[in-house]
Every structure is written in C-alpha cells, then in structure tokens.
Image (tube, grey):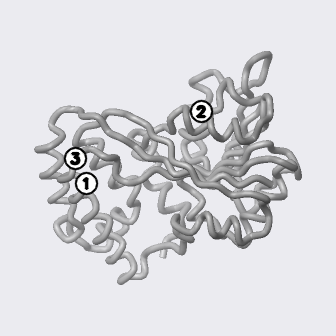
Amino acid sequence: MSDAVSRFSGVASLYDAVRPMPPAGVADVIGQWAGAADPDVVDLGAGTGLSTVIWAGRARQVVAVEPSAQMRALALRRISAAGMTEPGRDRTGFDTVDATAEETGLPGACADIVTASQAMHWFDPARALPEIARILRPGGVFAAYDCDWPPCIDWETDAAFAAVVHRTSSLEQQRGLRPAHAGKQGHGARLRGSGLFRHVREIAVHGREEGDAQRLIGIAHSSLAGIGTLLADGVGEDDLGLTRLRQVSARRLSEPRTWWWTYRIHLAVK
C-alpha cells in the first residue's frame, strides 16, 4: 500500500496543470470569519501552491506546509514566478516548509487562519486536529475545504466520471492499494467531536472555469491517483471505465465548455 505522499508525488506536474484554483470567494469567507487585518496563514497539505497563492494581497504572511518534495518544488516555483517570496509594504510574504499537518514544526499560536485544501481526509485527525489548535491563535479559524469531483458540465460526462470513481475505489480496496484516509464526509463531525473548537459551520462556495476533454481526463488521473497504481498493477483502462470516459469526453468536450465547481468549506473557530 502506498502512502498519500508518494501517491500524489507521482502526479505532481499533472496535478498542478489541471486542478482548479480555489475561487476568490473561498478566501473571502474564511478571511471574514477570522476577522483579522493582515492575517498570518498556514496552508496544510499545500500541494503545488494552488490554495496558497489565493492569499496574495490578503495576508501578512503565508506558510505552505507540504511533505512531498515534488509538490513543494512546484509550489515554490508558483510563488517565485509571481514575485511573492518576500514580505513588504502591502505585500504578502510566502514560505514553504517540509512538514506534515500532524507535526508542522511551527511555533504555537502563530496563525490567525489555518487551511487544508483537498487534504484533510489524508490527515490523521487524532494528531492533526490538536496540532492545528496549537498553532492557531485564540479566535483563529481553521478552514478545511474540498471541491466536488467532477465539475458540473453535463449529465453524460458526470455519469462516466462517477463510474471511474466507483471502479477505482472498489479495485483499490480489493487489492489493498488504497492508503488509509479519514473520508471527507466526516469533517464536520470530527471537528465538533474534537472539543478543540467553539463553533463549526459548513458552507458552499461556487467557482466557474472552462475545460476540454484532455483536462477532464487529467482531472481523473490527479483526483484519483490510484488510477496510476492500478494500471501499474495490471488493471486495464476498460476495467477502470477510463475508455468510456475518454469516449464520452471526446464527444461532449471537443471544445472547451463551462465547468461549475462546488467547494464545501468546514469552518471551525478556536
């Protein structure tokens, strides 16, 4: 069984190329709940920095915590390309750290906002939630958010994608290839049950992009990293439903179409 770090390191470049960047509304609502001017932000499981750079111009300092060297290198490249490595007047400072959500190595009470984008289900809640509470300042906000897979495009691509999700998950479990993970549906219950947060709320924010067939196939490979593991284990694309997804997306997405994303944000106040 591969771990979550190696699972996504293998698709880091694809992940960075096809994944959506969270819409501005995500940072808007989190920042409003935190209520801090020029907040200090820690982004856990930051990946390639897609969720990190949305804080440019909104925060004083942002620390991207990411254990994968490949992901971290791409995050640093994204940050550097935008000229956002050094803080200054009216400018956000950015840094990357080789660490995990369970052991960030950061000082206590260092953050007004802690985020986890598409990542919390890979954390060990028993260890990660106390660490999050430790680095948050009193009244600080933890925000775990995930977008629904796939984006809403049309019913046929949706059904074909859902079939790939089902088959991939089933085959991973049968072959013992799926890393342990907590499950996105339980985020709210785990946050409330931890006793570490005074109030928890879930909200949906929507984003809009465009994409074609090639990007949708890339989304499948990056969001279902087990596809690569199963293919290497001898499973065919027909068995995974990928052949059908390619056929449907080639027909329905021969030209770029509007993609609607739904982000589900769990907000927890320390």
User: Crowding near pointer 1: few (<14 within 10 Å), some, many (20+)?
Assistant: some
Residue type at numbered disc 1: Asp
As drawn, the label of residue 158 is: 1
Q: Is residue 99 left or right of residue 227?
A: right
Q: Judge by depth and name the residue closer to the eye, 119 or 257.
A: 257
Picture quadrant where residue 213 is located = top left
The residue tagged with tag 3: helix, strand or loop? loop
Residue 68 makes an appearance in the image: no
Give the foreground label among 1 and 2: 1
Q: Judge by depth and name the residue closer to the eye, 255 or 86.
A: 255
Which residue is under mark 3?
A: 154
Q: Which residue is drawn at 21% across and 59% down?
A: 160
Q: Do the residues labelled 1 and 2 touch (CB within 8 Å)?
A: no
Q: Where is residue 44 in the image (x, y as percent from the top left)?
A: 66, 51
Which residue is under mark 2?
A: 54
Q: Are marks 1 and 3 in contact (CB under 8 Å)?
A: yes
- Give the spatial CA distance, label 1 vs label 2: 28 Å
Q: Is residue 239 left or right of residue 188?
A: left
Give the foreground label among 2 and 3: 3
The residue tagged with tag 2: helix, strand or loop? helix
Image vertical order of residue 104 relative to residue 60, above or below: below
Q: Judge by depth and name the residue closer to the eye, 152 or 116.
A: 152
| First along the sequence among labels 2 and 3 | 2
Picture quadrant where residue 266 is located = bottom right
Q: Where is residue 19 in the image (x, y as percent from the top left)?
A: 42, 43
Q: Where is residue 97 in the image (x, y as percent from the top left)?
A: 72, 46
